[in-house]
Image (spheres, coloured by chain):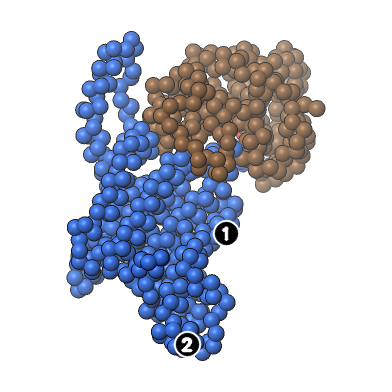
Chain colours: A brown, B blue
Amino acid sequence: MAYLELHGLEVSFDGFKAVNGLDLAVERGELRCLLGANGAGKSTTLDLICGRTQPTGGRILLDGQDITSAPEYRRARHGVGRKFQVPSVFRELTVRENLEVAHSRHPGPARTIRLFPGIRLDRRIAEVLEIVELADELDTRAAFLSHGQTQWLEIAMLLVQDSALILMDEPTAGMTIQETGKTSRIFQRLRGRHTLIVVEHDMGFVREIAETITVLHQGKRLSEGSIRQVEEDPKVREAYLGSGGISHA
Amino acid sequence: MSKSTLSRSKPYAQLAAYLLFCAVILAVPSFVTDAFLLNKFARYLALGLAAAALALSWGYAGILNLGQGVSFGIGAYAIAMHLKLKTSPVHTGSAGLPDFMVWNNLDHLPWFWQPFHSSLFAVAAGILAPVVVALLLGSFMFRARIAGVYVAIITLAMLAVVNLLFIDQQAYTGGFNGITDLAWLEAGSVTFDPYSPAFYYLSAGALSLCLLLGLAFTRSKAGLILQAIRNDADRVRFFGYDVAAYQSLAFAVSAGMAGLAGMLYAMVLEFASPTFMGVPLSLSMVIWAAVGGRGSLLGAAIGAILVNFMQGSLSESFLDTWQLILGGMFILVVVFLPNGLSSLIGILADRLTRPARQTPDTALAALSEAPRAGRTPS
Ligand SMILES: Nc1ncnc2c1ncn2[C@@H]1O[C@H](COP(=O)(O)OP(=O)(O)O)[C@@H](O)[C@H]1O
Ligand SMILES: [Mg+2]
């Protein structure tokens, strides 16, 4: 049994099936890339896994447990972490406070009411700050960060959250080549220890990090395999006919 | 500089401000000996506590409770029931029934009045009954993910319902008149005559205690999560926090504080009335909190005390104009100081401490190999 399994997953928005009978199995420690044209249902698939959207059919199993109808916070406690396509941080809070919220090993109010986040940083938070180079912005409100920094802050929050399964929606969108390179190095460090599902458009980035790729098309799995296998798959070629193949999706 | 940045980077300044305020209100009887003035001040402190309670739910958790009067009123009635029973033999003879029950042809004390013979029970009920009501209403609202203006509407509707209920159940609540002619609270050998320094100390002590506990609550990680929820509730869920539980918690803690405020208010006025649950008073509390600064419990309390102090210093004939002034003040503050008067202190403190703090900063920068970036633009 794989770590994450989707069985015939389906969601319908007013009759339109954004995800339509999707089957997917991701092993523990795997780094899986989701590819597909705009509107293929990639973000919606991540929404279904993390609980932002409720499926209208099918099942989601995480580590053998059925989480299909569990509320978001329970899934998060089961180890699901999510980075959104539009960077999503707490804009009114400082970088430090954002990271403190992300540090959610003990999420119950009975516990947090007795915790007093001090000036001293938790070791894990300090480590992550080094990686994402936000140490100088600790007391800056997130609203004042640049787009790139906001992107990094959300990645930092996921690293601090330390989820077993991390869902990344277009993590390198809007990043410079250097930043993309850095993101790729972070992912290399995460692989093995965490299970990652990454939605990405940048094929260069995908080539660097991917082992297995799943191609979505109209809410279904079109193809799956290594980059080479996927690129040579006639179904993929057909679906992307005219756009010059998946590399230009 | 934003209030959250301020509150976290200057923890000791914040604590000092709270302690200073507590010291000031506790010192008042050393300078004021006039009984009527002390009574007046005690009343302002009770209203300050109600506003601080509102700041906790509104300012920190983003729950705009327009029905603060529900908790405030329940607290007031709980203590009034006890203090009424203490007067009963005097007012109604051996039957021991409160006067309004006699007028309503009741021949024995209703069962739910019985335990209010105990002062301990009454005080506990005045705090815990609002907490339970808030937990019930809160878990209903927040599990259903009702937020923003809908919370305001529901709490306002709740206020109207509870107010009507108390007016309607005349035989048990005294109806329109409420519960009047109350005795004084006694604890051990102390009698809390509302015109005595003892009563003033009770009010000031209650407010101080609530402010300090509230400060601890808001500065705890739970307080931080509440601010994150106010900012983006959905995002908080994906970190594993049960948002509804946190919102219910803030709502309930606020209700408990408001219940205590209501108890003090009933004791200081020596009656409990359905007007305590009226819409005007609850809306006034919102204005006090907004004027003082809903982002700070202390700010909201000071806002309530200041506004009521100004109102109390005016003559009766001036009260209509006063409503205008109050409305104007509200608009001015909301437009020019969205975080209330207390943010003014933050802005001033920032101005004053900036040069002082730059000295060690530059000294450090000169010593260290890699000087840190300049001040953040917040
Ligand atoms: N909440 C929603 N309501 C209606 N339609 C939606 C909703 N979310 C997504 N969709 C539609 O579902 C399809 C898949 O969207 P999405 O998963 O965001 O695609 P992508 O693969 O580009 O991430 C799109 O056609 C989108 O318009
Ligand atoms: Mg998308």
Give the amino acid type for the residue marked by disc 2 in the picture: Ser
The answer to whether residue B324 is above or below residue B359 is below
**Residue occupying the point 50% across, 82% down:** B171
Q: Nearer the viewer, residue A203 or B127?
A: B127
Give the left or right position of residue A247, taking residue B225 as reference: right
Q: Which residue is mark 1?
A: B136
Q: Sequence order check: which comes first, mark 2 or mark 1?
A: 2
Q: Nearer the viewer, residue A27 or B307?
A: B307
Give the left or right position of residue B273, taking residue A178 as reference: left
Q: Which mark is on residue B345?
A: none
Q: Quadrant of residue A188?
A: top right
**Residue occupying the point 46% across, 77% down:** B85
Q: Quadrant of residue B140?
A: bottom right
Query: Does label 1 point to a residue whose CB lies under 8 Å from ligand 1?
Result: no
Q: Residues within 10 Å of mark 2 (few under 14, many from 20)?
A: few
At which x and y percent is residue B364? 29, 17
The quadrant of the image that shows the C terminus of chain A is top right
At which x and y percent is residue B285? 36, 60
Residues at marks 2 and 1, CA–CA distance in whole angstroms: 39 Å
**Residue occupying the point 75% across, 36% down:** A65
Give the left or right position of residue B232, taking residue B180 as reference: right
* Residue at the farthest front position: B189
Q: Which mark is on residue B94?
A: 2
Give the left or right position of residue A7, taking residue A244 as reference: right
Q: Nearer the viewer, residue A20 or B210?
A: B210
Provide the chain ID for the residue under circle 2.
B
Give the amino acid type for the residue marked by disc 1 in the picture: Leu
* Residue B156 appears in the rendering: no
